[in-house]
């Protein structure tokens, strides 16, 4: 126990830097200086050894005499696998912990119960394979009067509940109602600006309203061309949910050519009969936010079954082309920045406003970033024609 205590103290004192070698050196110094004396004391007689064991047992009894209710909120890159979701539920039941797990990207686990059970729960889930897992916040409260029943002091449900992929706002609401909003804010790494609470009172109840300023600062973006969407509605719903989870703004447009640009082409080389060729719409998707969030959405996109194939079976997207990933210049004047951010925010996904002409789309793209319009010109001849028209105006 003494060695463990010394090593823990050394680790805490070196938080934020490489501490492994420092802790090992501390342990080595303790062994050289005190281990020999401790062995001599233990071998001197059973009385000394018994005294040492009595000290340990007394410490354990003191801990048992105190009933402490603990809470942990844990952030994960994602929680998707059924086996992992089942294991979390079983562990919570085993240690009599209540709370919530929010599945999807990202995953959040909030537990409450006996402090010892919380510690064991965290230790066991850390032994599982995770892309990323960290305890973002914790708290402990001693039950007054030596009472052993913690149920009257719980702030969360006694049963462990699972929330869906799109239920982050529900988790925020539950934490607020339980008086644990500070844990949620720490988990999501959100600065708590209480001065904006009054401004948020009139927001709809179904919004993620946690009394903070949630304005997105657009510093990065990506423009993607998608060849087709067999299940357009389901595909677009997946994109909306992925961007919402990552805190990004989403733009989707089906760009059609002007009717004047439909052309007549021969039916075949041996026939004089011509047919009217109508080009199918070009699908463009824009994602805007900070660089980490945008890249996170792109990574999920490539690895998820977002569409269906010709047999109506879920499939990966194999025909998406990232036209450009770009940093949005923040060195512009405040008026220009405000105008551009308002333009991006105003293009939030709307199922009833998907269709537009190439001309309108190019004007929109040029308003976001001139370099992005140039990238679009290189990859799409139709867009190039529209840009030439605009340049001539």
Image: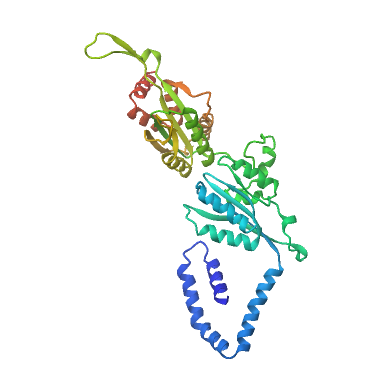
- Residue at the spot x=71%, y=64% of the render? 67
Rendered location of residue 213, percent (x, y)? 61, 41
> Taking the image as drawn, is residue 328 in sight?
no
Q: Quadrant of residue 116?
A: bottom right
- Residue at the spot x=47%, y=32% of the render? 235
Residue 205 located left or right of residue 27: right
Position above or below: 344 against 292? above
- Residue at the spot x=68%, y=42% of the render? 197
Q: How many marks?
A: 0
- Foreground pick, 195 / 52: 52
Residue 160 located left or right of residue 85: right
Rendered location of residue 282, percent (x, y)? 40, 25
Rendered location of residue 326, percent (x, y)? 41, 38
- Residue at the spot x=37%, y=19% of the render? 279
Residue lying farthest to the bottom in this orientation: 44
- Foreground pick, 160 / 274: 160
Q: Quadrant of residue 166?
A: top right
């Amino acid at each position: 126990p003494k060695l463990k205590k010394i090593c823990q103290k050394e680790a805490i004192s070196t938080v934020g830097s490489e501490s492994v070698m420092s802790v090992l050196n501390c342990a080595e110094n303790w062994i050289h200086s005190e281990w020999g004396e401790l062995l001599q004391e233990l071998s001197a007689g059973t009385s000394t050894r018994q005294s040492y064991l009595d000290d340990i047992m007394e410490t354990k009894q003191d801990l048992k005499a105190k009933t402490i209710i603990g809470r942990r909120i844990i952030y994960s890159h994602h929680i998707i696998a059924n086996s992992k979701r089942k294991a979390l539920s079983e562990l919570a039941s085993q240690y009599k912990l209540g709370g919530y797990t929010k599945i999807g990207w990202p995953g959040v686990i909030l537990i409450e119960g006996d402090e010892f059970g919380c510690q064991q729960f965290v230790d066991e889930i850390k032994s599982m394979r995770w892309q990323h897992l960290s305890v973002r916040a914790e708290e402990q409260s001693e039950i007054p009067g030596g009472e052993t029943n913690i149920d009257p002091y719980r702030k969360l449900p006694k049963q462990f509940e699972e929330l869906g992929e799109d239920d982050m706002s529900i988790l925020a609401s539950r934490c607020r109602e339980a008086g644990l909003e500070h844990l949620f804010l720490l988990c999501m790494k959100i600065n708590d600006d209480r001065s904006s609470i009054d401004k948020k009172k009139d927001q709809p109840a179904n919004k993620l309203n946690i009394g903070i300023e949630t304005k997105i600062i657009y510093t990065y973006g990506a423009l993607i061309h998608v060849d087709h969407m067999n299940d357009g509605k389901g595909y677009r719903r997946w994109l909306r949910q992925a961007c919402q989870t990552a805190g990004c703004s989403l733009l989707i447009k089906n760009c059609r050519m002007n009717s004047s640009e439909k052309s007549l082409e021969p039916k075949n080389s041996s026939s004089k009969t011509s047919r009217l060729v109508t080009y199918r719409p070009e699908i463009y998707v824009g994602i805007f936010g900070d660089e980490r969030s945008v890249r996170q959405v792109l990574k999920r996109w490539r690895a998820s079954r977002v569409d269906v194939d010709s047999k109506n079976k879920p499939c990966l997207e194999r025909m998406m082309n990232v036209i450009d990933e770009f940093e949005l210049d923040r060195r512009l004047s405040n008026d220009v920045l405000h105008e551009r951010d308002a333009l991006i925010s105003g293009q939030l996904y709307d199922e009833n406003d998907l269709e537009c002409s190439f001309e309108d789309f190019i004007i929109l793209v040029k308003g976001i970033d001139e370099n992005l319009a140039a990238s679009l010109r290189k990859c799409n001849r139709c867009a190039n024609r529209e840009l030439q028209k605009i340049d001539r105006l």
